[in-house]
Image (cartoon, rainbow, N blue to C red):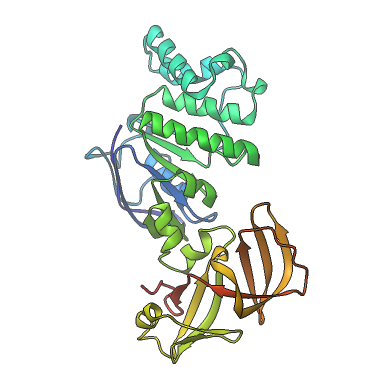
């Protein structure tokens, strides 16, 4: 496979709209990188620049120390899997998977061996003589992946490949992609708006917003130590709770509650006395306590082993995730505490470290 470097990549359209700003990352050989963010954040545009489907306005694209910035797509040795499968309806699964090799005029025996090998990896051996219309959505996506595999490219690109699948198939196909990556040890760049895909698939995640990279790191790094308010709010389900307040005399004080800071947080926030801050706490870090902050229940969602309790603290909304079945009703009151919190600078939105 190959290493891939994106150096100061930018995309500016003729009308002056800039879709990607100064994108930088070094992707190691065999690494699976996931670009995640809301619609319009520039992640698919970045992928299309790597594929050669979009011109690069400025910056460099390097594969294995070779500059391919101006190289046409067909010469980049990159395979792309799209969300809409892009299969030929009149061809069989075998013919679809073999098509790119036929265009290259590969030896027929080599083509046959590569198609059978890819079909074995993807569990499509018994589907090779069928047409796409006879397959489920998950099987069609596997055919699209098989078409990429037979080319043995240096880099695989995935553009939201699971978006057209239902929830059950999405989960199953996601696991197949993860197993495929481990088996092929391939370099992969994967685009999604689904944070679950990002957290479960990625070696590293690139979180984007409005064309800018917000944070690059492992899934655990983005979840445990978000760089700013955007990453904290986007990564995690249910999303993080946020409260506005200030630090006063060793306490975090908001309009709705206050609590004493521990020694670590007192030291961390020593320069923020009286300044506006944002407190973040994940729902699973809201725990029941004998005494503490009063949560008024609005809605109780039982999910089996866990319960999501939506309510208010004063006038502020809050979601708690308790690790047991709860039968709260609207108006019930629960005392809670926060066993882990994050602080963000109100002005810059950056995390206070």
As drawn, the residue found furthest toward the front would be 290
Vertical relation: 172 (above or below) 224: above
Side (left or right) of 25 relative to 334: left
Q: Give left or right: position of 311 versus 261.
A: right
Residue at 48% in and 72% down: 341
Horizontal and vertical percent for residue 291?
A: 60, 80
Query: In the rendering, at what x and y percent does residue 239 appear?
Result: 57, 62
- Give the quarter of the image for residue 352: bottom left
Residue 257 visible in the displayed image: yes
Q: Is residue 328 above or below residue 150?
A: below
Q: Specify the quadrant that holds the N terminus.
A: top left
**Image quarter of residue 228:** bottom left
Between 72 and 304, the one nearer to me in the picture:
304
Residue drawn at (50%, 55%) of the image: 37
Q: Considering depth in this image, is 299 or 192 the residue closer to the camera?
A: 299
Task: Evaluate whether residue 18 shows in this view.
Answer: no
User: How many circles with numbers are drawn on the protein?
Assistant: 0
What percent of the width, then of the height, locates residue 223?
A: 46, 59
The residue positioned 24% from the left and 37% from the top of the image is 64
Q: Residue at x 64, y 53 (%)?
A: 305
Furthest residue in direction left, as rendered: 65
Compared across the picture, whether 152 is left or right of 255 comes to: left
- Quadrant of image for the C terminus: bottom left
Q: Residue furthest top?
A: 109
> Horizontally, is 181 left or right of 254 in the view?
left
Query: What is the x, y in percent for residue 128?
Result: 56, 14
């Amino acid at each position: 496979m190959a290493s891939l470097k994106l150096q100061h990549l930018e995309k500016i359209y003729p009308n002056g709209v800039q879709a990607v700003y100064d994108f930088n990352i070094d992707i190691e050989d065999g690494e699976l990188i996931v670009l995640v963010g809301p619609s319009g954040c520039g992640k698919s545009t970045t992928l299309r620049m790597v594929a050669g489907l979009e011109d690069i306005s400025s910056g460099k694209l390097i594969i294995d120390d070779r500059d391919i910035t101006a190289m046409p797509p067909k010469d980049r040795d990159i395979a792309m899997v799209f969300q809409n499968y892009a299969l030929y309806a009149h061809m069989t699964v075998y013919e679809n998977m073999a098509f790119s090799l036929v265009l290259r005029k590969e030896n027929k025996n080599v083509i046959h061996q590569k198609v059978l090998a890819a079909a074995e990896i993807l569990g499509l051996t018994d589907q090779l003589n069928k047409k796409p219309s006879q397959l489920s959505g998950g099987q069609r996506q596997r055919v699209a992946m098989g078409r990429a595999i037979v080319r043995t490219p240096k880099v695989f690109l995935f553009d939201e490949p699971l978006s057209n699948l239902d929830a059950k198939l999405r989960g199953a196909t996601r696991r197949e992609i993860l197993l495929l990556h481990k088996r092929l040890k391939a370099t992969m760049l994967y685009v999604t708006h689904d944070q679950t895909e990002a957290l479960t698939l990625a070696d590293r995640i690139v979180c984007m917003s409005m064309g800018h990279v917000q944070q690059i790191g492992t899934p655990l790094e983005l979840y445990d130590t978000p760089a700013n308010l955007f990453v904290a709010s986007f990564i995690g389900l249910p999303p993080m709770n946020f409260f506005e307040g200030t630090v006063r005399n060793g306490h975090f004080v908001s309009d709705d509650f206050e609590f004493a800071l521990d020694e670590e947080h007192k030291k961390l926030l020593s320069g923020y006395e009286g300044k506006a801050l944002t407190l973040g706490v994940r729902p699973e870090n809201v725990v029941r306590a004998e005494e503490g902050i009063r949560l008024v229940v609005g809605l109780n969602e039982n999910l089996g082993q866990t319960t999501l309790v939506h309510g208010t603290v004063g006038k502020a909304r809050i979601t708690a995730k308790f690790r047991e079945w709860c039968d709260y009703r609207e108006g019930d009151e629960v005392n809670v505490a926060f066993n882990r919190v994050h602080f963000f600078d109100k002005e810059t939105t950056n995390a206070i470290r």
